[in-house]
Amino acid sequence: MLTRYYDVGEVKELMDRFDWYFLPIANPDGYEYSHTNLRVANIGTEGLEATHGKVFQVGTPPDLFYASSGGAYDWAKAEAGIKYSYTYELRPDGNSWNGFVVSESEIEPSGEEIWASLAAVAAEL
């Protein structure tokens, strides 16, 4: 979407209004907040799903996958003081044997979904 910075008002507005930091892994709303309220994460999920109609799950990594500690989302909340951090998993079939390997044709739609989600969250904040 950055290639559309000068063509799409929403892109320019959001890029100019916020400082964006991308980490390889993060968690919606920070660890503690996610256990009691997923409002912001749900807003982001609505943006994801509205883009191409794919359904996404919302939750903390231990709730959706398995318990682990020391993820980037833990560090972002506890050490860096980042109030909102997000983890986006790739979009293959949940029953797929190949985990997070996606075909080339899935890359651009994934980026479009993630942008729609980030834009929805940023507008809410």
Image: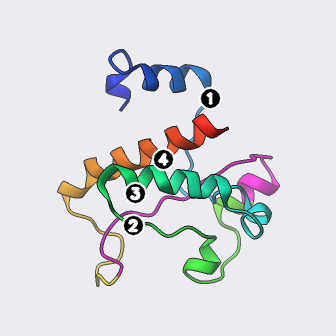
> Could you say whether the residue bearing mark 2 is in a helix, strand or loop?
loop
Question: Which sits earlier in the primary sequence, circle 2 or circle 4?
Answer: 2
User: What label does residue 49 carry, if any?
Assistant: 3
Q: CA distance from mark 3 to mark 1?
A: 25 Å
User: What label does residue 55 carry, if any?
Assistant: 2
Which one is closest to the eye, mark 3 or mark 1?
A: 3
User: Dot 4 corresponds to which residue?
Assistant: 117
User: Dot 1 corresponds to which residue?
Assistant: 19
Q: Amino acid at mark 3?
A: Glu
Q: Amino acid at mark 2?
A: Val
Q: CA distance from mark 3 to mark 2?
A: 6 Å
Q: CA distance from mark 2 to mark 1?
A: 28 Å
Q: Amino acid at mark 1?
A: Asp
Residue under the point 43% across and 42% down: 115
**Tag count in the figure?**
4
Q: Classify residue 9 as left or right of residue 60.
A: left
> Residue 119's x, y, as percent?
50, 38
| Majority secondary structure in the magenta region | loop
> Residue 10's x, y, as percent?
45, 25
The region drawn magenta spans: 75-94
> Could you say whether the residue bearing mark 4 is in a helix, strand or loop?
helix
